[in-house]
Image: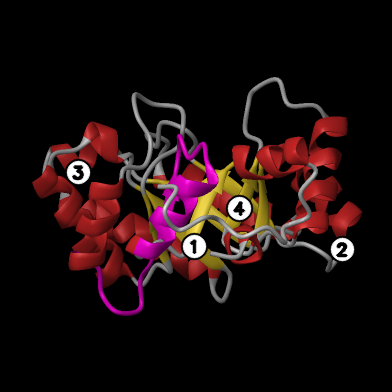
Amino acid sequence: MDRNKIFKAVDHTLLTQQATWSEIQQICDDAIKYGTASVCIPPSYVEAAKEYVGERMRVCTVIGFPNGYNTTAAKVFETEDALENGADEIDMVINIGDLRDKRFDRVLEEIRTIKAVCGDHVLKVIIETCLLTREEKIKMCQLVTEAGADYIKTSTGFSTGGATFEDIQLFKSHVGPKVKIKAAGGISSFEDAERFLELGAGRLGTSRIVKLAKAEGDHGKTEIDPGSY
């Protein structure tokens, strides 16, 4: 697979608590250089980052991150604020406690509410797969589809595990035809990235893919050996 195809699916991510503005600028520069789908950054940097990149790169940010147990009202405010500051895409974390308590109407309504605020802006719903049963993952595929969100996303990258091939296969079998899939957390090689895309992921949340390319001095033109995975 041509690496350009992989880069175009990457949300180049920096969400660590200690992230500085100079580091945010650097990932913006790298994202533009390698042609990633977006940069995914903390909400506090959205306004400055959007001014910095302009229309050269989409800016994504996170809502209710990383635990998801904020009230819906708080998530709505976060979303409105992010969009006003120039965010192009929103990645929200569900209330996992509501899901595990089988309060499905609350989970559904929250996603619907945030999507209504987003309007035409892309909304990705993070369900934190490592904390869920198979049945809960399937239920979230149904709820995300019913709520009209654009993507279902595996992970925050801040819990006990990240994306797995099995979860992407599970999502692909249970989401509606209009819902796309984002694999995030622990994607550490081009081989893994290629496999996630082959299984049905449309986006990859990762900081490592661009770092690998930079370390190799690769500008995205090298093809992956299909037998290397």
The x, y position of residue 138, in whole percent, is 15, 55
Foreground residue among 13 and 67: 13
Q: CA distance from mark 1 to mark 2?
A: 20 Å
- The answer to whether the residue labelled 3 contacts the one labelled 2, judged by CB atoms less than 8 Å apart, is no
**Does residue 49 appear to the left or right of 64 in the view shown?**
right
Q: Secondary structure at mark 2?
A: loop
Disc 1: CA contacts within 10 A as few (<14), some (14-19) or many (>=20)? many
Labelled disc at residue 11: 4
Amino acid type, label 4: Asp
Q: Residue at x 46, y 65 (%)?
A: 202
Q: CA distance from mark 3 to mark 1?
A: 19 Å
- The answer to whether the residue labelled 3 contacts the one labelled 1, judged by CB atoms less than 8 Å apart, is no
Q: CA distance from mark 2 to mark 4?
A: 17 Å
Sequence-wise first label, 1 or 2: 2
Q: Secondary structure at mark 3?
A: helix
The answer to whether residue 92 of the structure is visible from this angle is no
Q: CA distance from mark 4 to mark 3?
A: 26 Å
Amino acid type, label 1: Leu
Sequence-wise first label, 3 or 1: 3
Q: Residue at x 76, y 52 (%)?
A: 31
Q: Residue at x 63, y 26 (%)?
A: 16
Amino acid type, label 2: Gly
Give the residue number, with chain letter if any, for mark 2.
Answer: 54
Q: Secondary structure at mark 4?
A: strand
Give the residue number, with chain letter if any, for mark 1.
Answer: 123
Disc 4: CA contacts within 10 A as few (<14), some (14-19) or many (>=20)? many
The answer to whether residue 29 is above or below residue 18 is: below
**Does residue 151 appear to the left or right of 224 in the view shown?**
left
The x, y position of residue 23, in whole percent, is 81, 32
